[in-house]
Image: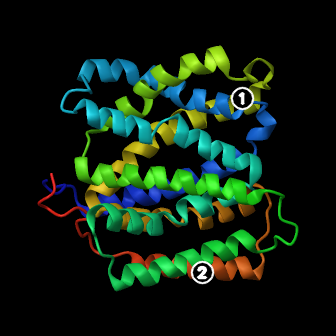
Amino acid sequence: MSTSTSPQWTGYGAAWIIVFVWSFWLIVSRIAEDSGLTIYDLAALRYGLACVVALPLCIYYRAWEGMSLYQIAVLSFILGPIYILSVFSGFLFAPAAHGGIFMNGILPLVGIVIGFLLYRAVPGRRQLVGGVLILVSAVVLAWDGSASLVAGAWKGDLLFVIGAVFFSFYMILSERWKPRPMQIIFCGTVVNAAIYLPVWVLFLPSGMADAPAGPFWLQAIYQGFVPNLIGLLFVAHASRTIGNGNTAVILAAVPAGGAVLGAILLGETLGWISITALALLTLGLLIATQRRKPVIPPSVV
């Protein structure tokens, strides 16, 4: 497959924009309980509102052309309800800050494991050293100041890890298949809206009727449009341009971004252990980031 012709700086820029988008998503998700919406409502907003914008564009550009049924099915499944409900369910058990740590913080390690198992892609020494530092800092951030951990928080952390596995596959396939932006939107929104929304309307509990207007619209606008449209496109561009490995490493900065925004917007404080762990995470990012190398051998089609 041909390498993306976009300058590498656009890929790095896209990845760092997503760091901010997802860091702010942690803040929005922390206050989602105040909206009165269920996790099924949040998923419905994610697919339904994005589909309102995406459907006319996908029809006009015939977004399904150039993709096999297999590619459509796989990409839609990876971005589908199992992925997003696992993530939203994680917040029912674990503190919201764990979402950034156990999804984004371990993305480089998950990507290394998947790349090795599927494609025998052997990570370099820099990636391994950086990955270990990122993992250590993520664990420290998760446990710092948690003498009274939420009971069952490990269940939420496990659900976040499941989300990280799904998203790692998405980044790998974005690098391998190089789907066009409209193809990503078609699979991530239109197909999943067609599958999920009828199930939600007929069978799943909802709190939309009683949700306060302010919190509802915050969740609707951010959950409905920002991560599922802007987020997916930017991640795909970064993966195509600078590679899945570098993209995953940069996205591992989300825990630090969430902590900083939490301190600014929610008045949360950071202890010296957390500050040290964030510095360690940053060091891991700097070590693990390297020039783009193909994750998929050129001979693989």
Q: First in sequence: mark 1 or mark 2?
A: 1
User: Residue farthest to the right?
Assistant: 148
- Residue type beneath disc 2: Ala
Of the pair 50 and 164, the residue shown nearer to us: 164
Q: Secondary structure at mark 2?
A: helix
Say whether marks 1 and 2 touch (CB < 8 Å): no
Task: Give the vertical position of 262 relative to 224 (above or below).
Answer: below
| Residue 30 visible to the viewer | no
Q: Residue at x 24, y 70 (%)?
A: 293
Q: Position of residue 115 (x, y in %)?
A: 33, 64
Q: Please tell me how crowded label 2 is: few (under 14), some (14-19), or many (20+) other residues with Cα within 10 Å.
A: some
- Mark drawn on residue 188: none
Left/right of residue 56 with respect to residue 32 in the rendered view? left
Q: Secondary structure at mark 1?
A: helix
Q: Residue at x 61, y 21 (%)?
A: 200
Left/right of residue 146 with respect to residue 44 in the rendered view? right
| Residue 233 visible to the viewer | yes
Left/right of residue 148 with respect to residue 79 in the rendered view? right
Kindly identify which residue carries mark 1.
Answer: 216
Kindly identify which residue carries mark 2.
Answer: 279
Q: Position of residue 86 (x, y in %)?
A: 60, 44
Q: Position of residue 222 (x, y in %)?
A: 59, 37
Task: Give the vertical position of 250 relative to 96 (above or below).
Answer: below
